[in-house]
Image (cartoon, rainbow, N blue to C red):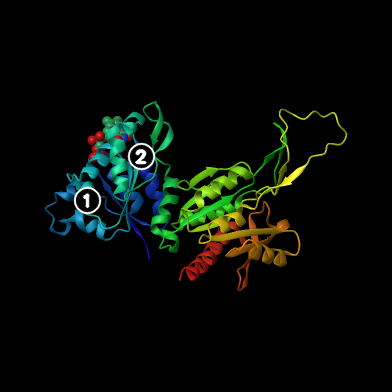
Amino acid sequence: MQKTIILGVCGGIAAYKSAELARLLVKSNINVQVVMTDAAKKFITPLTFQAITNNKVLTNEHFWTTNANETMEHIHVSRNADLILIAPATANFIAKINQGICDDLLTNICAARNCNLVICPAMNTYMYMNPPNLRNIEQLKNDGVTFVGPETGDQACGETGLGRLTEPQDILIDLNRYLSNSKLKDLKILISAGATSENIDDARIITNRSSGKMGISIANEAFDLGAEVTLIKGKTEVLPHKGIKIIEANNHEEMEQNVLNEASNHDIFISVAAVSDYKADHVFQGKIKKDQNVLNLKLIKTSDILKSTKKLFPNLFCVGFAAESNNLINYAKQKLVEKNLDMIIANELQKTMGEDQAEVVILDKKQEKILPKMEKKLLANSILTEIYDRFKTNEN
Ligand SMILES: Cc1cc2nc3c(=O)[nH]c(=O)nc-3n(C[C@H](O)[C@H](O)[C@H](O)COP(=O)(O)O)c2cc1C
């Protein structure tokens, strides 16, 4: 069924960006009902939004209307909406709704809502950092209102800092979470992704060829499906979605520390990172000179993060990845048992590493299931469905 969003536009410079946001929402097959404050109309005309959304734009004239068909708009409008999105939200608007002030159509609609409210602030950085504004935002967050942004960068006023409106395409990514009827909504998922690297000396490292594509795809998909996602991120060029909590981990030790610190706050741990299995016994200070024909490096085995996590947190649903160059299913089964995992995803190293597509076999203690070759984004979705089904069965 088509979703409906109320797009509230306030009187800030970034109001022109709402037109692009409205266009992207319409393109995503969302019915957009724009509501403008009086100040917003000084920056952009209702006609622009009407042309983009194909809907009549609501303004304060409709609040004080004498037209019998349009009375009580402030209540009726949100009854048909799946979400109210305010972009840009001014400091003035944020202050008003935090105080429960209802002096125009948009503040009334927000006060009388029966759906989620998402606010995208945009203002001068000093205005944003103004203590009353920060207090208002904090209070609204405590009341269950969601904030997207603001971002840091150059501002229309010539200053630089925190206060820019989040770019429309990024707002859209965030919205998917609230619009999807996802089963992952109440889940906290911890994911490790990317490659780690271990120092040999101050200039050289041992690392691996993992691109991080699979792990980040799973993190992004889980986030889009509504989960609260924490990503322990090794080296990768792939960008996680805004809104995912990211903790950087460059080497095995940082990866282990961060996973163990976060594990108790999560329901599921999906270990996708390609963590170094060995590290230098001794890290040289400075740079090793090139004066020997043969250089022997002594490597020592690192600990198994996934295994120790499951041991320390037996109630955490733990999913491993097994990338093997041969004997795929047997090795994956061994790992499943040895690490006491709830599920393992096996894939052939040569066919997967760095590629945009992959084929995997999913194994748990009872069954094996092949997920045929597909784009990693689609695969991430299927993998999360498999994880969710098993997680729910375990819970019951
Ligand atoms: C040129 C100009 C630009 C403004 N830009 C912003 C802005 O980006 N963010 C903001 O919070 N207020 C901004 N303001 C102030 C708001 O327009 C003012 O607080 C207004 O009362 C907001 O009304 P509203 O919240 O009902 O839309 C700006 C004012 C002017 C004159």
Q: Is residue 309 left or right of residue 137?
A: right
Residue located at (16% from left, 56% from top)? 72
> Image quadrant of residue 55?
bottom left
What residue did someone put label 1 on? 111
Give coordinates of residue 102: x percent, y percent.
Answer: 18, 46
Outermost residue on the left side: it is 66
In this view of the protein, which residue sits in the foreground, 9 or 324? Answer: 324
Front disc: 2 or 1: 1
- Of the two numbered discs 2 and 1 on the same chain, state the one appearing first in sequence: 2
Count of numbered tags: 2
Position of 198 relative to 275 (above/below)? above
Amino acid, disc 2: Tyr
Quarter that holds the C terminus: bottom left
In this view of the protein, which residue sits in the foreground, 51 or 155? Answer: 155
Badge 2 density bin: few <14, some 14–19, many ≥20, Cα 10 Å: some
What residue did someone put label 2 on? 16
| SS assignment at label 2 | helix
* Ligand 1 placement by image quarter: top left
Residue located at (68% from left, 56% from top)? 352
Residue located at (45% from left, 51% from top)? 173
Position of 169 relative to 187 (above/below)? above
| SS assignment at label 1 | helix
Amino acid, disc 1: Ala
In this view of the protein, which residue sits in the foreground, 65 or 268? Answer: 268
Give coordinates of residue 232: x percent, y percent.
Answer: 55, 47
Give coordinates of residue 281: x percent, y percent.
Answer: 73, 40
Position of 21 relative to 293 (above/below)? below
